[in-house]
Image (cartoon, helix red, strand yellow):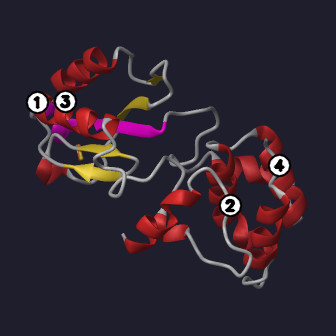
Amino acid sequence: MSRLTSTNISIAKEIIGRYPRPKSALIPLLHLSQEQNGYVTTEAMSHLAELLGLTPADVYGTATFYEMFKFEPVGQYCISVCTNISCQLLGAWELLEHAEARLGVKAGSTTDDGRFTLEDVECIAACTEAPAVQVNYRYRHCVTPAAFDQLVDDLSAGRLSEEVPPHGTLARVRQRTTAGWSGTATAQQATVDAL
Ligand code: FES
């Protein structure tokens, strides 16, 4: 499913109503779309353009500026290993190699079970805690190979389900509306609101 569901259209309209100009609601609506589908599809961008009085190119141009929007399916957990200079000096390349071996995929790929996507990313602003990793944008600092293994074990066993919601759920842009929320991450709402 790519276009917003009827429930999410109601939510979208309510969000749009909060802004003087409809196009100002684009980022929240991109998040809403990503939460519903797991990533931002081409059809979804066209639908958002319709709702906001924009062109699909306008939506695409904005969406692709932001790293957190994905345009193809990603895993439930997106693990981002920083390999920029501070992290590199403290073992990030070795950590990334370890991560690839542990997950059985190259950076930029998703495990066959759809659980993990591994990314090699530029500086994530945690240089004093290098090497730094994010999982669904939640930080892990000074990550050793053993700590990475523990992270994967904990995620696989569901031990971090309260701390790390599924990819696509972002606390800072989630806003309750009278229409409620629907999407793949709805079950995590209470947890996320508490973060
Ligand atoms: S260089 Fe890795 S967080 Fe800045």
Q: Can residue 177 be seen at all in this image of the molecule? A: yes
Residue designated by label 1: 146
User: Is tag 4's residue or tag 1's residue first in the polypeptide sequence?
Assistant: 4
Q: Give the alpha-carbon distance from disc 1 to disc 3, as whole Å.
A: 5 Å
First to last magenta residue range:
76-89
Q: Which tag, 4 or 3, sits closer to the chain's start?
A: 4
Residue corresponding to mark 3: 149
Which is in the foreground here, disc 1 or disc 2? 2
Give the Cα distance between marks 4 and 3.
37 Å
The reply to whether callout 2 and callout 3 are in contact (CB within 8 Å) is no
- SS type, badge 4: loop
> Which residue sits at x=73%, y=82%?
19
Residue type at mark 2 is Ser
Q: Nearer the viewer, residue 188 or 95?
A: 188
Residue at screen point 36% across, 37% down: 79
**Mark 1 CB in 8 Å range of ligand 1?**
no
**Does the magenta segment cover residue 85?**
yes
Give the answer, above or below, for where 84 lies relative to 4: above
Kindly tell me whether residue 84 is visible in this rendering: no
Chain-order first, disc 4 or disc 2:
4
Measuring from the top left, give residue 34's x and y in whole percent.
64, 50
Marking on residue 3: 4
Does any atom of ligand 1 lie closer than 8 Å to the CB of label 4? no
Under circle 2, the secondary element is loop
